[in-house]
Amino acid sequence: MMGSGAISWSSRKQSIVTLSTTKAEFIAAMACACHAIWLLKVLEKIHFQQKRSIPIYRDNNSAIKLSKNSFLRGRSKHIDVKFHFPKDLTKDGVIDLIYCRSENQVADIFTKFLKLASFVKFKKLLGACTLEDQV
């Protein structure tokens, strides 16, 4: 989101199989962090200065904790090193992984079937409207 409108989003199947939701969310956070860095570079080219860390909202507390924890143990110790990019960005203050309850996760409009009330709420939060709304 920039201002009050969505400027970028994606929804795709992960290329690897994970054994838990936490690992899947952790890997998704890495993809999101990479895209955020790309957007930062685009903004720098047009001389827009980002003054604070980029908030990335996740609805999985375990994945957030895994991204902030410097030690891997137990079932997370085998995660490939390339997926630890968000840890470095969090530590450096470039991104900030923030917990967001599932019922408030606007990104779900792109990835899940939603009840009509949730769909309408998220659509409005994204700044999207129908042609009838504009007439």
Image (cartoon, helix red, strand yellow):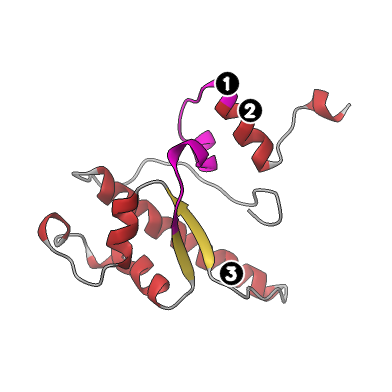
Using the image as rendered, state which of residue 128 and residue 69 is in the foreground: 69
Question: Residue placed at 36% from the left, 74% from the top?
Answer: 88
**Left or right of 130 on screen, residue 22:** left
Q: Are marks 2 and 3 in contact (CB under 8 Å)?
A: no
Q: Amino acid at mark 2?
A: Val
Instruction: Return the residue at label 3.
Output: 40
Q: Which residues are magenta?
A: 98-117
**Mark 3, other Cα within 10 Å: few <14 / some 14–19 / many ≥20:** some
Q: Which mark is residue 90?
A: none
Q: Amino acid at mark 1?
A: Leu
Residue 47 x/y as whole percent:
72, 77
Is residue 106 within the magenta segment?
yes
* 22 versus 111 height, above or below: below
Instruction: Return the residue at label 1.
Output: 116
Q: Which mark is residue 120?
A: 2
Q: Are marks 1 and 2 in contact (CB under 8 Å)?
A: yes
